[in-house]
Image (cartoon, helix red, strand yellow):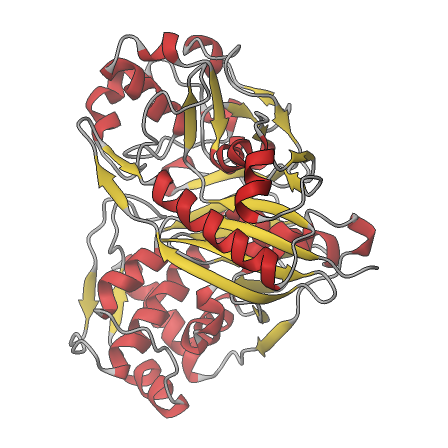
Amino acid sequence: MISKRIAVIDIGKTNAKVAIVDTKDFEEIAVFIMPNKVRQGSHYPFFDVEAIWTFLLDKLKYTQAKFGIDAVSVTTHGASGALISADGKLAAPILDYEHTGPENISNKYDAIRPKFAETGSPRLPAGLNLGAQIYWQFSLDSSLLDRTAYIVTYPQYWGYRLTGILACDVSSLGCHTDLWNPFFGNFSSLTDKLGIRDKIAPARQSSDILGSVLPEIKTVTGIPGNTPVYCGIHDSNASLIPHLLGGHPPFSVVSTGTWVIVMTIGGRSISLDPERDTLVNVDAFGNPVPSARFMGGREFELLVGGVEDTSIDYQTLREVAKEGPMLMPSVVTESGPFQGRQHVWVGDEPLYGEPRRVAAISYYLAMISSQCLSLTGHDGPIVVEGPFARNRAYCIMLASAMQCKVYAASSTTGTSTGAAMLTIETDKMLAKPISEEFTYEESDIFCRYAQRWYTALEE
């Protein structure tokens, strides 16, 4: 296989990134990051897409000059889309999905949204259902529906700016939008009720080539005009790609970032409970995937008080596992398997900055992850992607709680590697390297901690 350099645009909820991935070994040879800031508009907070666009063009120009770019792939967070007017510009700013405005008319929206059995999409707060966002935006401005000529999911918004071609991708449509039926691979009945079926762009496979870069992009960045831009993918599903292609079911992937997304492949047959933030995601190939989620990265940020180092010595990990304390759910109460439940410390709360606090928080996040895994019918090994893969305390406790092997992926930006794999023929792909393997012993101190946590959960 000829080695290629893939520029991956990776727009997360917290940060926007440009990563250059070498397809020889699917390693990132360069990563550039900027904060993904939210701006306050007259009606609602919105993503600053122009600041992101300036950043992207600058880094694409730099990386083209330094490395050369053979293709561009795009991956973004879910729960977002763009309303585009006939002139190609945004008809309205892209809503920050954490804004609670859509809840103001939730009763009206609930009356028209499809049931879980049709979409596999649970009813979520704020703007986490893209259908609820659009419905609310139309209610704010009676002319917006008519001004909206096209609707695209978020990865394809950036693809549109690069190529001028409109599309949606199946994985983004399947990310609790209420707009997609993952069981039949088609738009849901909600698109008719919203009056957007003829406006929403065609659904395409994530690995489709969307088109080539526009002449103006070539001029600004130096990227050759025949450089292909791939359709793009929801970020958690990007993390799943290497394991779908290189793994052997059953297994689960835990994609970590602002959101922790659990996806189970070939697991036990189970009925998903939409009241506990389970859902049906759609993978890059259009297949439904039992999933569960919570805002683990956000919870970590809120709890640690600015500490980023999770390299805690093993003795401290054992001491916390032996003596506590334990943090019980939930810190972010609007999502996850314990929505509405307020967190509480069992035992003395460690001080901010103490390694014991980071260890206890990491254990808490692992235990919530274990609940998500159980809800999706997990079986087999677990692969942890993203920042939590570098958190030894998290991985040790996850292996102990689930009593199975846990593999930490070595990639620093798991989503970027998966998105780069979209550009290569599937029979050429291999699973990403694993940096560490974590096992368990039923009688060890970490398993006993997990059992005490489960007991405290029921009290």
In the depicted structure, whether residue 441 falls above or below residue 304: below
In the depicted structure, whether residue 333 falls above or below residue 433: above
52 sits to left or right of 175: left
Residue at the farthest bottom position: 315
Q: Is residue 253 shown to the viewer in this render?
A: no
Q: Position of residue 117 (x, y in %)?
A: 51, 25
Q: Position of residue 60 (x, y in %)?
A: 53, 52
Looking at the rendered structure, the number of numbered marks drawn on it comes to 0
Closer to the camera in the image, 214 or 419: 214
Residue appearing at x 25%, y 48% in the figure:
333
Q: Position of residue 146 (x, y in %)?
A: 38, 7
151 sits to left or right of 34: right
Q: Position of residue 15 (x, y in %)?
A: 38, 54
Closer to the camera in the image, 361 or 348: 361
In the depicted structure, whether residue 240 falls above or below residue 359: above
Residue appearing at x 54%, y 31% in the figure:
160
Residue appearing at x 52%, y 44% in the figure:
220
- Which quarter of the rendering shows the N terminus? bottom right
Q: Quadrant of residue 22?
A: bottom right
Residue appearing at x 21%, y 79% in the figure:
353
- Which quarter of the rendering shows the C terminus? bottom left
Q: Is residue 51 shown to the viewer in this render?
A: yes
In the depicted structure, whether residue 326 falls above or below residue 274: below
Q: Quadrant of residue 128?
A: top left
